[in-house]
Image: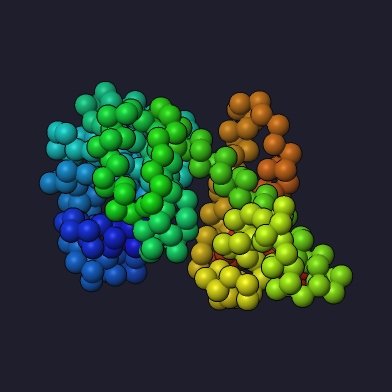
Amino acid sequence: MGGPMARNLLKAGHAITAFDLSAAVLDPVVAAGARRAENVADAIQNADVVITMLPAGQHVRSVFLDGGILRTAKPGTLLIDSSTIDMDSARAVHTAAQQAGFDFIDAPVSGGVGGAEAGTLTFMCGGSEGAFERARPILEKMGKRIVLAGGAGAGQAAKICNNMLLAISMIGTCEAFVLGEKLGLDPQKLFDIASTSSGQCWSLTTYCPVPGPVAAAPSNRDYAGGFATALMLKDLKLAQAAAQSAGAPTPLGAEAQQLYSLFAAKGHGGLDFSGIIRMLRGEL
């Protein structure tokens, strides 16, 4: 998702220096006009704003703390982390950044690759009002809804709650279509009815797991692209860890994690998470 996000910043007239360990990810951004950095230090040395998007908390800690962003960024640099990670890591980096004199916000996103390309992402932010207001004009070039959820780590809390709900609703949507198929319902007819009735939800109307009703949904591309099952599973694990820490009962969240764990274990971690309908049908 970072690639199209960076390209939208370029389109908005920002000068971008980009770095990624994957040349396949970095090359299209460079082709769009970004300067290629040789490493993290090279990427941030003259930056007014540093935006990171990394796989997990350990990577964020490594890049900011061990990797030296907090030691090498110039004074006054605004730091934005759009990774989806555990709250402990987010808060640890917040604290370290504050102690080093930097404004920092955790700003995970929702909207998938399609939203990143269209510039319609939702940013769920955690941090101070001042840091948020500094970040808002930048984030508005990549998203259409920018929300300050609260203090340090609140963006991560909002993201894992949102994605746990998304996983649960997708499984329910898939089960409804599988049942409808078994009962002889045409999927388009079920979509037409449910999308305007009490069963309406984002998983149905924007990301329908059966081909046909929603042209932009990954179901029309054999579940390629979109939001990978492995990433959804990561978020569900984060949600369960947070639920256990907070003492919050999340039985459906736990069941969703088990189902996506099984789907990924069958070798489908790279498929879009709506592809779980194949497993529910018994195809996989």
Farthest residue toward the right?
Answer: 183
Query: What is the total number of numbered labels drawn onto the structure image?
Result: 0
Query: Left or right: 129 with respect to 115?
Result: left
x and y percent of residue 17 in the render? 19, 56
The image quadrant of residue 8 is bottom left
Q: Nearer the viewer, residue 44 or 137?
A: 137
The reply, left or right, for residue 84 in relation to residue 197 is: left
Q: Residue furthest top?
A: 99
- Residue at image position (58%, 66%) is 271
Q: Is residue 266 visible?
A: no
Note whether 10 is above or below 64 in the view shown: below
Give how far across and how far down residue 141 sits, in percent: 29, 53
Q: Is residue 50 left or right of residue 149?
A: left
State the image coordinates of residue 123 (x, y, percent, origin top left): 41, 45
Quadrant where the image shows the N terminus: bottom left
Q: Is residue 159 visible?
A: yes
Quadrant housing residue 269: bottom right
The residue most toward the front is 196
Query: Where does the image place residue 237, in percent across and percent down from the top left?
Result: 60, 43
Instruction: State which quarter of the image contains the C terminus.
Output: bottom right
- The vertical placement of 133 against 235, above or below, is above
Question: Of 34 and 44, which appears nearest the observer?
Answer: 34
On screen, residue 46 above or below 70 = below
Q: Nearer the viewer, residue 176 or 90?
A: 176
Which residue sits at x=40%, y=56%? 120
With respect to residue 31, does 150 lie above or below?
A: above
The colour style of the image is rainbow
What residue sits 35% from the left and 43% below the top?
A: 81
Q: In percent of the image, x 63 and y 76: which residue is there? A: 212
